[in-house]
Image (tube, rainbow, N blue to C red):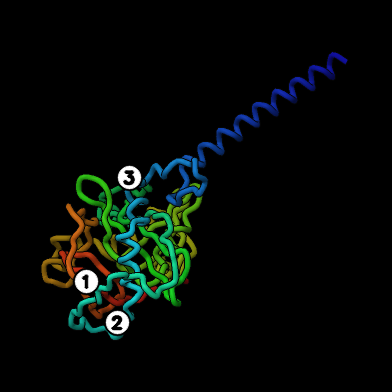
Amino acid sequence: MHDTRTSGRRAASRLSRLTTVLALSASALLSVAGPARATAPMDPLPADIPDYQAALDLVKSADVHNTVCRFLSVPVPQGDGGGTPQPIPDKADPCEGLPAFTVKDPLALNEITPGFVAGTSLPIASQAVQLSHLVSALDAPVNGRNATVMLAPTQGGGWHLAAVRDGDSDAAYAGKATVGTLVFTEPQIRGWYQLRLTTVEPLNDQARQGLAGRSSVSLSEYQKLVKARYADKQPGSLYDTSGMSSGYAAAKKTADTPSSTPLLIGGSGAAVALAGGVFALRRRHDTTT
């Protein structure tokens, strides 16, 4: 009987220790979860997104809602030419005649860093990828159209509205981040990838092409690929200074949100863009695979 009781106590002790380890492991995994915000009212805000409450307040604001309405009330420009800027109609109620909609909580849009591209940064997540923007999709299509709100960081802290884009692929891909993984984009080819520890996996056709058809590569191998593609196109390079491209640089922070009369511009993309004080609608190709 003594042996039986002793064995029982030992088994219970091992079970208790195992339960504690599992609980601690789950806690650790949750602490490195992706940028998606939990929906429970008492859950904390994402720790990896600075000033997240300010971003959340902004995307839920009447100003952003009205901007999305104005975007959705104008047909997407056709053609690939730059076109002549045309004012977007300024109605007293921008949302008049549109179905009700809400803007979802912001998600992190991460991009590869200039140092990673140049090969001067180590092939580790903290040096390879950085937060560039926040993106928020609509809760449902409006008259058959989707849209994505894009926020940019403001100098000194906080966020401001940078663009409203046609489609929801940016938010759809950003939302694929899971516990222990990181989603990022290679913006030059609009490739989307998922990083699992040190393994890079493609999420769309552009990314698969960027990996030469491979289903995955190591982060160090991916660094070699992007270095070969862009290292000679950095700011200050001949490619940059000759006017071939703006080069590859980190996203610039803007001191204040620009504001002016909204303009409608045809081009290679579709977005109401706040850039240089010009509020414009541009057309761009935006697909999800």
Residue that protrudes farthest toward the right in the picture: 1
Tell me residue 53's x, y (percent).
36, 46
- Residue 259 in view in this figure: yes
Name the residue: 26% across, 52% down.
153
Crowd around label 3: few <14 · some 14–19 · many ≥20 (10 Å): some
Residue hosting label 3: 50
Q: Amino acid at mark 1?
A: Pro
Q: Is residue 41 shown above or below 78? A: above
Residue hosting label 2: 77
Name the quadrant containing residue 210: bottom left
Relative side of 11 to 166, left or right: right
Residue hosting label 1: 262
Judge by depth and name the residue closer to the eye, 70 or 160: 70
Q: Amino acid at mark 2?
A: Pro
Relative side of 88 to 25, left or right: left
Residue that protrudes farthest toward the bottom in the picture: 79
Name the quadrant containing residue 252: bottom left
Residue that protrudes farthest toward the top in the picture: 2
Name the residue: 30% across, 75% down.
269
- Residue 119 in view in this figure: no
Tell me residue 77's x, y (percent).
29, 82
Tell me residue 259's x, y (percent).
18, 63
Name the residue: 74% across, 21% down.
10
Relative side of 245 to 152, left or right: left
Q: Is residue 212 shown above or below 123? A: below
Query: How far apart are labels 2 and 3 at the CA level?
Result: 35 Å
